[in-house]
Amino acid sequence: MQGIRATGNLFDVMGAHARIGRLLQAGDERPGAEPVVVLAEPFWIRRFGGDRALSARPIRLNSEEYTVVGVLAAGFVMPSATSSSFFHSPPIRIRGAGLAIP
């Protein structure tokens, strides 16, 4: 599973849409903001069985708790060599690292 720390405007710039809930917003990255996550649709289906009630619930990723704010609509592809399962703000912290990619 791979995650990416993303700014609040990433999905607007990429033209992405939410299947359920919402995508990241500018306020999600301000200091002290609640850690939130947007799940990629394949990850949401594989790991959570497509549970529509998951939005607004806390989940654990890499030993950190995040509130799920949304699921990306089908077909979103991040332009990189790897595909991501979740997008979060602020960064996951493990042993002082800024971003954990399991």
Image (tube, rainbow, N blue to C red):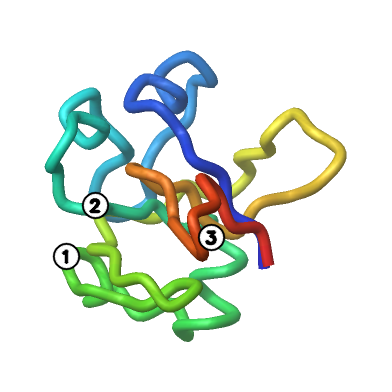
Whole-angstrom CA distance, mark 1 to mark 3, is 16 Å
On-image quarter of the C terminus: bottom right
Relative to residue 78, is residue 39 depicted above or below? below
Picture residue at 24% right of the left edge, 52% below the top: 21
Amino acid type shown at disc 2: Gly
* Other-residue count near label 3 (Cα within 10 Å), few / some / many at <14 / 14–19 / ≥20: many
Element class at badge 2: strand
Element class at badge 1: loop
* Horizontal and vertical percent position of residue 25: 24, 30
* Horizontal and vertical percent position of residue 68: 28, 62
* Horizontal and vertical percent position of residue 48: 45, 83
Relative to residue 42, is residue 32 depicted above or below? above
**In the orientation shown, which residue stands out farthest toward the front?**
96
* Other-residue count near label 1 (Cα within 10 Å), few / some / many at <14 / 14–19 / ≥20: some
Amino acid type shown at disc 3: Glu
Query: Does the CB distance between marks 2 and 1 fall below 8 Å?
Result: yes
Q: Label 1 belongs to which residue?
A: 56
Q: In front of the other: label 1 or label 3?
A: 1
Task: Choose the circle earlier in sequence order: 1 or 3.
Answer: 3
Q: Label 2 belongs to which residue?
A: 21
Element class at badge 3: helix
The quadrant in which residue 71 appears is bottom left
Q: Label 3 belongs to which residue?
A: 41
Whole-angstrom CA distance, mark 2 to mark 1, is 8 Å
Picture residue at 66% right of the left edge, 58% below the top: 101
